Amino acid sequence: MSAQNIPFVELYAVDRHKTVEYFTSSFGFQEIAVSESPRLSSSLLRQGQVRLIVSSGPDTESFLEEHGDGVADIALGCDDVSATAAAVVAAGGRVLPSGSGATVVSGFGDVRHTLVGAPHEGAGELPADRTWTRLEPGTPGEQPVAVLSLDHIAVCLNAGSLQDAVRYYIEGFGCERFYSEYVEVGTQAMDSVVVRSPSGGVTFTIIEPDPSREPGQIDGFLRRNSGSGVQHLAFLVDDIVATVRNFRDRGVEFLSTPAAYYEMLRERIPSMADQIANLSDTHVLADCDEWGYLLQLFSRSPHERNTLFYELIQRRGAQGFGSANIRALYEAVERERVASA
């Protein structure tokens, strides 16, 4: 009855067409189908194994008023929908009303989970909870695949709710506690736990701020989002340097990294010395663990309330999530501040 994969993620957007244009023009997704109804209009986008639904309309208005553009539904593929729904209820969750006949259960904050039965809606199928019209495919090879899959979903929760959420995903969806860390950055701190399905197809990085410390970026997200929600989607890529250059040329705005970070990187990960020039040029961050290394970079949020943003991540064996980069960036900024004082 455990969750196996993520068939789709649904975003609610004030301007559906603008958001679709962002993903297709900047990130290289293809719009493959549309669904139109008086209450809800949706576009289905695909790249690699990732499927995103972008929706707007009267049914999205209360969510958008409360949270702004953001993830409203993370579908979970499971072998036995009824058994999973029963486990969710036993774990303290709720089965939510659904006009489409789909089984929908509570998640965190106002984010829900549509439960999808086997075969979990593979890449060639359309979600069954609404009526779709397929669009004519583009020219073969017109959009090279850069995004391979959804590496993880980062969730920010109100302080004090982390452990209950972790228990809920373990008991309700059969996930396992994969990794946990308390991260201190200067006067700020956060607690994080990663839960993952046994299949490896579902990974949530769940974070809460430490209210005993100074407010930080997690508190800022919670304020802008009016509570718990999805902070970012992490897209797995094969060559992050080439992908960042491509996406940057397409108009994606990424966060910048201070030069001092790369001076410190030579000391922190000496084996990456020959890659420093390319990483510095693209502002890509690097981290390593006992299994290997990873490279990552975060976009600026394209959404009006500066809530949801996106990550590109390349893995070469590493199983972590780059938490050392949080400290390294803080130290780099401090080094540059002192140098310029």
Image (spheres, grey):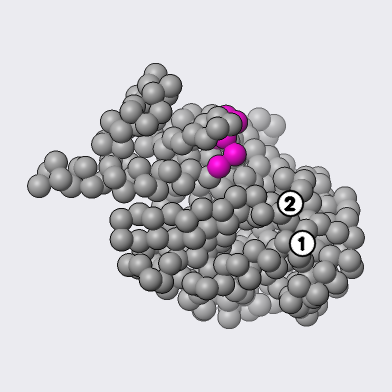
Q: Which residue is mark 1?
A: 173
**Which is more N-terminal, label 1 or label 2?**
1
Measure how far apart labels 2 and 1 are at the Cα level.
8 Å
Marker count (numbered): 2
For image coordinates 9% across by 47% down, the residue present is 341
Between 300 and 337, the one lying in front of the other is: 337
Q: Say above or below: 195 vs 261.
A: below
| Extreme residue in the top direction | 274
Between 177 and 39, the one lying in front of the other is: 177
Does 115 lie within the magenta span?
Answer: no
User: Label 1 near label 2: C-beta < 8 Å?
Assistant: yes
Q: Position of residue 321 (x, y in %)?
A: 53, 45
Q: Position of residue 309 (x, y in %)?
A: 48, 55
Report the amino acid beneath label 1.
Phe
For image coordinates 67% across by 47% down, the residue present is 50
Magenta residues, start to end = 314-320
Does 315 lie within the magenta span?
Answer: yes
For image coordinates 82% across by 52% down, the residue present is 121
Direction from residue 290 to residue 135 in the image, left or right? right
Q: Which residue is mark 2?
A: 197
Report the amino acid beneath label 2.
Ser
Residue 127 appears in view: no
Which element type, helix, strand or loop, lies under badge 1? helix
Q: Position of residue 247 (x, y in %)?
A: 47, 39
Q: Position of residue 19 (x, y in %)?
A: 54, 58
Sort mark 1 into few (<14), some (14-19) or many (20+) by Cα contacts within 10 Å.
Answer: many
Direction from residue 86 to residue 313 in the image, left or right? left
